[in-house]
Amino acid sequence: MPQHLASIRDTDQLDDLLSEPTPQVLDALRTNSGDLIILGVGGKMGPTLARMAQRAADDGRRIIGVSRFSEPGLRQKLDARGIETIACDLLDDSAVGNLPDALNVVCMTGMKFGAGGQQPLTWAMNAYLPTVVCRRYPDSRIIAFSTGNVYPLVSVESGGSVESDELKPIGEYAMSTVGRERMYEYFSQRNGTPISIVRLNYACELRYGVLVDLARQVHDGLTIDVSMGHVNVIWQGDANAQALCSLTDSASPAFVVNVGGSEILRIRDVCQRFGELMGKPVQFTGIEAADALLNNGTMARSRYGEERVASDQLIRWIADWIERGGESLGKPTHFETRDGKY
């Protein structure tokens, strides 16, 4: 990872960096042989995770990406990079039944935004779909993406929630994500399926993420609400790598691991840093709460390697990207939400 880079040139270079496998990823994929299928590859993280797996894979190993592929051009882009693609509605049991066998499965599906108005679909995506996946792939190793939203707000001084903490979801979306985990745990115990559950918050790159949300507010001269006063983020390339490494730890009963940044960032400090880099004044509103949604990723770093991109490096890249008019996915994280309503 070229830490010396002052700027990331374009989306091609960005995708190259986000998909660069670590030595630990290479080891994990060598250790766990067989084809790898990624369900929900069309999301924000899926394309670069798939490419990382493809770059780390041995010759002849199939990396397969499954999605509805509603984004124009994405399927062709993945195909061009050696990733086989299959268009599929994963809520269609018969269609899932026709997917190819694979010894390794990464399930990245889920619904968060809009959950407040579509509760039945939210529960179907987050709690029913895992049963479809586990029934289709009972003999595979499964990486199941989850979220730090299964935890409650915790004191900033606590260092963040750890894997053994009691789950206390806030709001119906978060409840459905606990349902997702329980389904994976049930089928892991019932069928002996080795599963790793990855509780992630928050992955960030230059086109989306918490830091991008804040940078764009600073750039546009908006007043920043600091009520959710602290956050931890992780470079998406590091999140991809740690998630893929968890394949080695998949187990029955299911293995659980947090993936999150090592630093607890103060929102006020981050915005002031963006203001310095962009030459913009920054104004704030609200009172910082003593608690926040924080995820302690110490165990993942100890097992899968330290982060390659520190927060200040990421902040500088994002400021430069936005100043140059770089691409945005236009998908705000709503990380500041404290009542669980997305």
Image (cartoon, rainbow, N blue to C red):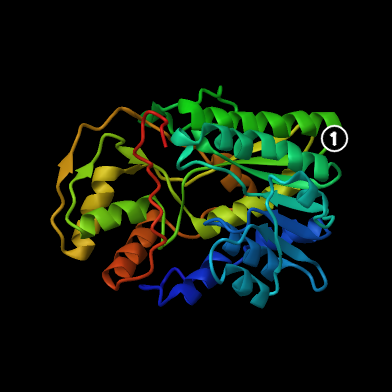
Toward which corner of the image does residue 331 lie, by quadrant? bottom left
Q: Residue at x 82, y 54 (%)?
A: 98
Left or right: 54 as drawn, with respect to 116:
right
How many numbered marks appear?
A: 1
Image quadrant where one finds the C terminus: top left
Residue 133, by quadrant, is: top right
For image coordinates 79% across by 48% down, the residue present is 94
Taking depth in this image into account, of 340 and 315 the one nearest to the observer is 340
**Residue pictured at 43% horizontal, 48% vertical:** 233
Q: Position of residue 100 (x, y in %)?
A: 83, 57
Left or right, 262 with reference to 83: left
Residue at point 83%, 29% (across, down)? 190
Query: As drawn, is 339 to the left or to the right of 216?
Result: right
Q: Left of 259 or right of it: where is 114?
A: left
Task: Please say whether residue 151 is visible from this viewpoint.
Answer: no
Give, as a three-letter code, the residue at label 1.
Answer: Gly
Q: Is residue 258 above or below residue 169?
A: below
Is 307 or 139 nearer to us in this picture?
Answer: 139
Nearest the camera: 260 or 104?
104
Where does residue 186 sit, x and y in percent of width and height? 75, 28
Q: How far across and down, in percent of the image, does residue 212 sit? A: 35, 56
Q: Residues within 10 Å of mark 1 (few under 14, many from 20)?
A: some
Residue 136 visible at all: yes
Residue 191 x %, y %: 85, 34
Q: Find disc 1 in the rendering and name its residue.
A: 192
Q: Secondary structure at mark 1?
A: loop
